[in-house]
Amino acid sequence: MYVEDLRNAVGKERKMRVKSHICAEKVPFSRTHFKTEGLNRGRLISELSRVTTVKFQPSEGNALLFSVPSSDKTKVVAIFDSLCYDYIIIKETGPFLRILRLLRRWGILAGALLVTGALCVYPFSVSDIVTDGECNAEISRILTESGVVRGAFLWDFDADAVEKRILSLYGISFASVTKRGTRVYVVVRNERDDAEFDTVPTSSVAASKRAVVTRAIVFSGTLLVKYGDVVDEGTALIAPYVLVGEERVACAANGEVFGKTYTEATLFYPDTVITREYGDTKTYTRLSFFGKVPETPDSPFEEFELSVNTFRNSFLFGYGVFEYTFREVRYTEMQNTMTEEQMTAAAVSSVREKLSPDAVVTDSIVSVRRAEGGTYVKVTLEAEERIDV
Amino acid sequence: MFIDEILDRFGIEDAFAPFTVNIIGNGHVVISGIKSVTFSSASEVCVRFSKGGLKVTGENLLIVQIGGGDAYVKGDVKGVELD
């Protein structure tokens, strides 16, 4: 409504419509801008200056641009009318006027408030959760209970409390929870496995058999024997210390000690040997009820071996199946056809088996003696082997 | 106020100073005690006091503000002449 049209031909001025129907006269600190043309502007200025304070703006030609407080607009208009001046109200300005006009644009205002509210609220949201380390289900549960969930809002986020809860879990050595912007960073480190410690034996290395010491390799400790020493089983070979000056410093005893051992054995080879041979087999099956054991059938063989297999079924009144297998056994007397050399070799081989695999046989003494019913072969093996195991 | 200090130094009262003209540099003139503006253009501004008048000449003269008997004239002031 508040449109003042250009009524005079002052050129083709573009009409500027004041868009607001807000009454500027009632708004403090508002100014109304006028434009007019005409001669004898001195009189106009005088009249205007009597009723209000006028501020002039630079203008071209005969135009006169000035502004007055909006509260004096009616007075100015009255002066124009009394002097028959044509005038244009170009605009009305003022800080409060601008605000009032803005308030009329409720859509913009609502949008500005919405944006402001969103900007104020958004930093409290959780847009992403960045994890570093092994975050198991338990840690996820703690985060969820603390409100750290994508899309949630954390108004009062206590990162220290969440860290403490995570650290209280078993196997967690480090935890860090920080919120930077809208992201929550969770760093978790698990405890390392316990270190494995090697046990260091503190006992001496002792001889496992009687021997004559030949050589030794000491890894740690102090060798107590030398070449040619005769040691019995249990004799200490390497002591668990080293000498530093005159002081004994404890350490593990470790090493390899070799010595000559003598292994003796006497074997008897009879002239006749009774061997066992198996012949036919015969199987009998018996059925019994009510848990009874049937009588063993008679063997069809004079010499035999018997094996029995049973099967029981306890369903209802139950029954048992007994299977008797007779195997015929024949004993045959055979003559020992081994020669003396063969018996010697067998005896030596038999004694050799008693030695450790890495033993080196250095000498063997064999004596053969005939006796009633057979032959005695006595074997003595000299070997160098480890005597510390 | 500034004008009061000046009057006090001259030993005159306000009643004997019906108008004042302050020239600031060569681009600003402040006139007090105006009764009317007789002429105004870009080259000349004429005002009248209760007794006498004043003419400001120059180029691109503009009455920046006027009211309450005071006027502020800005521009390239060449001369200020009292009638």
Image (tube, coloured by chain):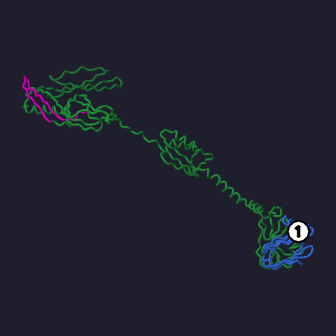
Between A77 and B52, the one nearer to me in the picture? B52
Relative placement, left or right, of A27 versus A351 is right
Percent position (x, y) of residue A290?
Answer: 32, 20
Which residue type does callout 1 highlight? Phe
Q: Which residue is drawn at 47% across and 40% down?
A: A171
Q: Bin the neighbour count of mark 1 within 10 Å (Cα to Cα): few under 14, some 14-19, many 20 and up.
A: few
User: Where residue A302 sits in the image (x, y, percent)?
Assistant: 14, 22
**Quick one: quadrant of the C terminus of chain A?**
top left
Q: The green chain is which one?
A: A
In the image, taking residue A223 as reference, residue A136 lies left or right, namely: right
Q: Position of residue A260 (x, y in %)?
A: 18, 33
Q: Is mark 1 on a helix, strand or loop?
A: helix
Where is the N terminus of chain A found, in terms of image quarters? Answer: bottom right
Magenta range is A362-389
Q: Which of A329 and A42 is in front in this view?
A: A42
Quarter of the image holding residue A287?
A: top left
Spot occupied by residue A50 in the image (x, y as percentages of width and height):
89, 70
- Would you say A270 lies left or right of A88 here? left
Chain ID for blue: B
Specify the principal SS of the magenta part: strand
